[in-house]
């Protein structure tokens, strides 16, 4: 599938992914914030807040991965290469952030 129908399907997949990621993240953050503010289960609240933030940060990375898979399926090699470069930059950024966090 190429052309307009392939791009329309990609937009639908990406829209669902972004909506699902944001809603899931918001749910974890809301429950975690409510628990934290109540003071009832602060350790559990911290875990939920961390998971919510992780999902929120992972959503754009997942968007790039889904885009890559769709471009491969559509055999649009220019966008496959471009998306691989973007994914590489994101992975380097995550690795550098992780290493800096471990050091300090």
Image (spheres, helix red, strand yellow):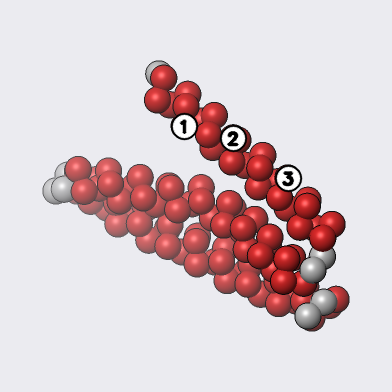
| Residue at position x 76%, y 57% in the image | 80
| Disc number placed over residue 85 in the picture, else none | 3
| Residue at position x 54%, y 37% in the image | 94
Q: CA distance from mark 2 to mark 1?
A: 9 Å
Q: CA distance from mark 3 to mark 2?
A: 12 Å
Q: Where is residue 77, by image quadrant? A: bottom right
The x and y percentages for residue 22 are 50, 60
Q: Which sits earlier in the primary sequence, circle 3 or circle 2?
A: 3
- Report the side of 11 relative to 104 (left or right): right
Q: Can residue 33 be seen in this snapshot? A: no
Say if 100 sits above or below 52 in the image.
above
Q: Can residue 95 be seen in this snapshot? A: yes
In this figure, which residue is indicated by the disc labeled 2? 93
The x and y percentages for residue 44 are 21, 48
- Of 23 and 69, nearer the camera is 69
The x and y percentages for residue 3 are 85, 76
In this figure, which residue is indicated by the disc labeled 1? 98
- Of 40 and 12, nearer the camera is 12
The x and y percentages for residue 30 are 35, 56
**Looking at the image, which residue sits at the far top?**
104
Say if 93 sits above or below 14 in the image.
above
Q: Are marks 2 and 1 in contact (CB under 8 Å)?
A: no
Q: Which sits earlier in the primary sequence, circle 2 or circle 1?
A: 2
Q: Secondary structure at mark 2?
A: helix
């Amino acid at each position: 599938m190429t052309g307009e129908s392939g791009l329309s399907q990609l937009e639908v997949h990406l829209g669902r992914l972004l909506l699902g990621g944001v809603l899931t993240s918001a749910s974890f953050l809301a429950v975690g914030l409510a628990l934290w503010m109540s003071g009832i289960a602060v350790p559990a609240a911290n875990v939920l807040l961390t998971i919510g933030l992780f999902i929120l940060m992972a959503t754009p990375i997942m968007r790039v991965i889904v885009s890559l898979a769709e471009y491969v399926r559509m055999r649009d090699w220019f966008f496959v290469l471009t998306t691989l470069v973007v994914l590489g930059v994101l992975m380097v950024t995550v690795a550098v952030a992780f290493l800096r966090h471990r050091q300090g």
